[in-house]
Amino acid sequence: MPGPMRQSDAPRTYRVKSFGCQMNVYDGERMAELLAEKGMSPAPEGEEADLVVLNTCHIREKAAEKVYSDIGRLVKKGEEAGRKPMIAVAGCVAQAEGEEIMARAPAVGMVVGPQAYHRLPEMIDSAASGKRATDTDMPADAKFAALPSRRKVGPSAFLTVQEGCDKFCTYCVVPYTRGAEISRPFSDLLREAEKLVESGAREITLLGQNVNAWSGEDEAGRPVGLEGLARALAKLPDLKRIRYTTSHPNDMTEGLIAAHGEEPKLMPYLHLPVQSGSDRVLKAMNRSHTAESYLRLLERFRAVRPDIALSGDFIVGFPGETDAEFEETLKLVDEVRYAQAFSFKYSPRPGTPAAGMDNQIPREVMDERLQRLQASLNRDQLAFNQASIGKTCEVLVERKGKLPGQWLGKSPWLQSVFFEGEAAIGDMVTVELAEAGPNSIRGRLLQLAEA
Ligand code: 5AD
Ligand code: SF4
């Protein structure tokens, strides 16, 4: 028999579950750091936590329903154990549907948006004393200043440099959930990067919804773009690699393209979503670029860095997309030969213009288009991996592999590489790429690269 229900009045253990994009992963890590600073500890593997933070994603599909079913599962598990976990809903579903969640799910003690999670500690105290709390304010820059400094990090770390989006693509909720574009100040980022490197990071991925729209002023007060930030970070001796994601074609600058040809620490990989190969669809999406202007941009990257691995995002079945327009997407894919890509069925998001458009595409049509697109993208991904065979490159070791003595890391082109031999997490090793699969590459360890 379970004992009487107990509200974990002062939660001692926590678990943060992040869904969706890398920015949510970053936010999830920072929330965990806040909770640790509050004296809480992560719930041991396999044990229920006193506080569960659902760090949600609202970009596609039935995001809100998923949150309610996760809440239901947590409540049920709690009942079986005779306790009531404290539940916080964070992230983009919290921002978009916070009030509704509070009304529909009494088990939720807190709703906190992506720009307000620095207030979690006070909200926990308030929830523990029986007062449910919601905070979905969007102050421009209060959050980062209020966060504690970074704890121990892995060899590959994320750093949010820019948040929000002013582009208003007609299918997308981001401008509503993450708010207007803001860039974090140069000096704050330099300081955070130094801390990450001191704590063991060898690679930093700069994150932003429109990361290449980042702008700031360097230490001398000169205006700089993302390439200026990357060049400044490259001066940190123990930082070996710099990546950034996600970029928008319209924010791309000459400076960033040039940096790819000049700064060896800037990795040869570019994630540049195009969404569709049809100019009519791109216009209806409010993308403000064409298939042709996108292709020309990629050519310029290839001119300065011929080995650059290209990646993109695609949506199939945007309202009104015809068969012929979809074929234009396949044509663009054939032309680019992506090393990696992400493709999605269009999902109407509440409150976005496209959700109210005529000619919504039937599910079966979207399924068929997605399958065809993914067949092309998978073909190209395998071909890219196969074309790497025989190359010698550096791999940053991120974790142990499944087999004893096996290690896993990433090539400069963001391929997962596994190999056997003497190594440790955080090492930069020289590996010959020996055998290609669709999602990973077997490497042969040649030597430990210089420290
Ligand atoms: N439906 C399907 N895919 C979407 N994306 C964004 N909004 C939607 C939507 N409503 C995709 C885009 C974007 C990626 C992060 O998610 O391809 O680049
Ligand atoms: Fe969404 Fe478009 Fe902004 Fe990307 S650029 S976050 S797809 S609105």
Image: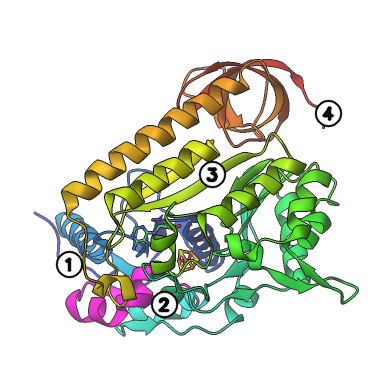
Check disc 3 and report the residue beneath it.
Answer: 311
Quadrant where the image shows the C terminus = top right
Question: Of helix, strand and loop, which one carries label 1?
Answer: loop
Q: Nearer the viewer, mark 2 or mark 3?
A: 3
Question: Of helix, strand and loop, which one carries label 4?
Answer: loop
Q: Earlier in the sequence, mark 1 or mark 2?
A: 1
**What is the x, y in percent for residue 260?**
76, 47
Q: Look at label 1 and name its amino acid.
A: Met
Q: Earlier in the sequence, mark 2 or mark 4?
A: 2
Quadrant where the image shows the N terminus = bottom left
Check disc 2 and report the residue beneath it.
Answer: 176
Mark 3–mark 1 contact, CB under 8 Å? no
* Viewer-side residue, 47 vs 75: 75
Q: How many angstroms separate mark 4 from mark 1 (CA)?
A: 57 Å
Q: Does the magenta portion include 101?
A: yes
Q: Nearer the viewer, mark 2 or mark 4?
A: 2
Q: How many angstroms separate mark 2 from mark 3 (CA)?
A: 25 Å
Check disc 4 and report the residue beneath it.
Answer: 450
Residue 99: quarter of image: bottom left
Residue 169: quarter of image: bottom left
